[in-house]
Image (spheres, coloured by chain):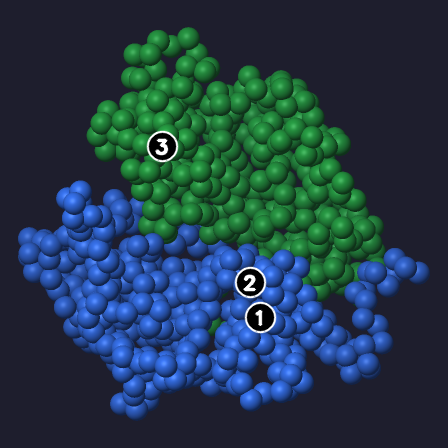
Chain colours: A blue, B green
Amino acid sequence: MSDNILRARGLKKHFTTGGVVMGTAGVIRAVDDVSFDVRRGETFAIVGESGCGKSTLARLLMRLLSPTEGDVIFDGIDVRNLKGRDLTALRRDMQFIFQDPFSSLNPRMSVGKLIGEPLETHFPDMSGAERRAKVSELLDKVGLRPEHAERYPHEFSGGQRQRIGIARALASAPKLMIGDEPVSALDVSVQAQVINLLGDLRDELGLTLVIIAHDLAVIRHMSDRVAVMYLGQIVEQGTVDTVFQHPRHPYTRALLSAIPVAAYGQRLSQTALHGEMPSPANPPSGCRFHTRCPYAQDRCTSQAPTLRPTGNGEDHVAACHFFADIAAAEPDPGRVGTPPRAAGASARFALYQDAMQERANVRSGQDQKQQAEPKPFHQQESST
Amino acid sequence: MSLVNTEAQPDLLVVQDFSLRFRGAPSDQINRVSFSVGSGKTLCIVGESGCGKSVTSLAMMGLLPAGAAQINSGKMLFEGQAMNLADPKAMRKIRGSRMTMIFQEPMSSLNPVFRIGDQIVEAVKAHSDATDAQARDRAVAMLQRVGIPAPAKRMRDYPHQLSGGMRQRVMIAMALVNDPALLIADEPTTALDVTIQAQILELIRDLQAETGMGTIMITHDLGVVAEIADTVAVMYAGTVVETGPAERIFNDPQHPYTIGLMSSIPQLTGARGRLSTVPGMVPTARNMPAGCRFSTRCPFARPVCTTEPPLVEIGDGHQAACHFAPLEIKLKESA
């Protein structure tokens, strides 16, 4: 199984809360027995709602937190007991992209410094000139300009800051990047730019991506395989196409049908799921989802289901006692039956795409002409 | 947009030609924004960060900090009564009773040191002569209505004891306890998970059907818009670039910004190709382009775009502020 770059085995992270003296001591089972493999070169997504433990899991993978139990094996090396030089090497090969581009960049460092810092740490032999050249190259790679190296984070918009964060993560030439909600703080149009960028970088540099997110549409767009988490456990896992078209766990089904779709006439007929996620300090017995599950039966309250194959293509697994019965009784809730876009909208989107393409061609033509006319069209007009 | 409604029923709220400039800014942040909403209907104002959607709603409520912004023009007609947007004092009487608002972050809009029951009671008593007991009864009934279990007991809770979804329910209860004619909801579900978001949207829809109130929903999420809107106003850099019935906006978008925005949303079905994007970013007040404010990012921009485009009627109340609307026809003409 050498093509698995990252393996998690029986990972657990329990946090203790409160104090013994006050009698409020408790254990939060943020991550409770999670195992999965990430294949080299793929994008693996972990999805779930707030409090499901997905961010804790990401930090365990990076060894920013130590697991209570279980192992993380990165490229054949158990990361649990790494120290000193070996840990530095792990930090070089595995990088993190943070959610909030406003708080994850030091406001007092110039962009050049921010991106140069990991170069200094991981490639101490690099000369200043080499480093500056590398920073320029990285800026170019993420769609910023070399002169941006002189500026400070506050001079950039959210999307640009996220690009800086990505350039910084790329600086150490990692094999794997973990993104914790890398696009969820961004506006839709900017989000699309960053999603495209991450996809391009993955293909160009042969990276493996692990994306933690709550937005299922973003995940579907970016990923090859997906694991759905609920209350610290994986409840379903498989290829994106299988999970989105034939979801088997009732939680996945509910999650998929709760997303509002940006198309007219797609209103949800009723609430998919009642109630809220229970506290991980006191998870329900048996199947943790049974308190909200519309299909729950007596067995679900006592016996915890394990992940087992659904028979829907390669390694699609779900942790539900009754997924076969549910699937037989109810059609797939995936948006398979969603009608295509309205004719007017499709025509308009095509028109827009063509115009964008045309613009891009004109731009690149201009660039080759030594940027003879760098101003946008309308400014040239207004100045004459 | 015309002040006169074509139907017999006059609009509940009409805002016309609203312009606002922050102190020291070289251009108007909000530029001649107009929209209207009818009783029992939902208008969604949609746009990305910085488009002015929240500032507009705060101005309607008279909640902009004094002196920070200068309102240059703007008429508001609410329940048949004309109001001057530049005079926030006039708004105090209707604010919280006839016109109420819920915000994105329920934790920071509830007072953390008062019990939620007391906060709702305060809202009731501020606008009526109800006795303490009457106000409490109304608060409990309202909490019950928004789906809070054991409401009489929950009245004694502090905001931190509730989950995000429950807090938003409390906010909704507080907003609706005085039976308003208009509810302004500023990103009410953005901080919530999708399953909870679905519950809150359903709740707002049910309450609206029950009370016949008009709703203005401010959001950046076109999925939420499709879910709840009767009419839509798309805002970009402080201007309404396109407005009309929801069906027309989704099925026949005409403004290049609306088109770009819609086509950059990742889909749950269909091919997973490269996402279409809107290049560049929103201009700041300092470098606001003359004429069409979207022209710096628009793939269709032409020399004429340095002049301000009027809102052109395309049919059925569908209007777009673009020199090239309707797009296919006008582009062909100009080619």
Classify residue A368 by image quadrant: bottom right
Say which residue label 2 marks.
Answer: A106
| Callout 2: chain | A
Residue A295 location in percent, x, y?
Answer: 16, 53
Say which residue label 1 marks.
Answer: A114
Q: Disc 2 residue type?
A: Asn
Q: Is residue B324 left or right of residue A304?
A: right
Cα distance in 3D space between marks 2 and 1? 8 Å
Residue count near mark 3 (Cα–Cα under 10 Å), binned few <14, some 14–19, many ≥20: many
Residue B19 location in percent, x, y?
Answer: 72, 36
Q: Disc 3 residue type?
A: Val
A353 and A87: which one is in front? A87
Classify residue B206 by image quadrant: top left
| Callout 3: chain | B
**What residue is at 62 percent from the left and 36 percent from the top?**
B56
Image quadrant holding the N terminus of chain B, namely top right
Q: Which mark is residue B248?
A: none
Q: Which mark is residue B170?
A: 3
Q: Is residue B125 left or right of residue A350?
A: left
* Residue B317 showing in the rendered view: yes
Tell which residue pokes out farthest to the bottom in this image.
A2
Residue count near mark 1 (Cα–Cα under 10 Å), binned few <14, some 14–19, many ≥20: many
- Say which element carries label 2: loop
Residue B159 location in percent, x, y?
Answer: 34, 35
User: Quick check: marks 2 and 1 in contact, CB under 8 Å?
Assistant: yes
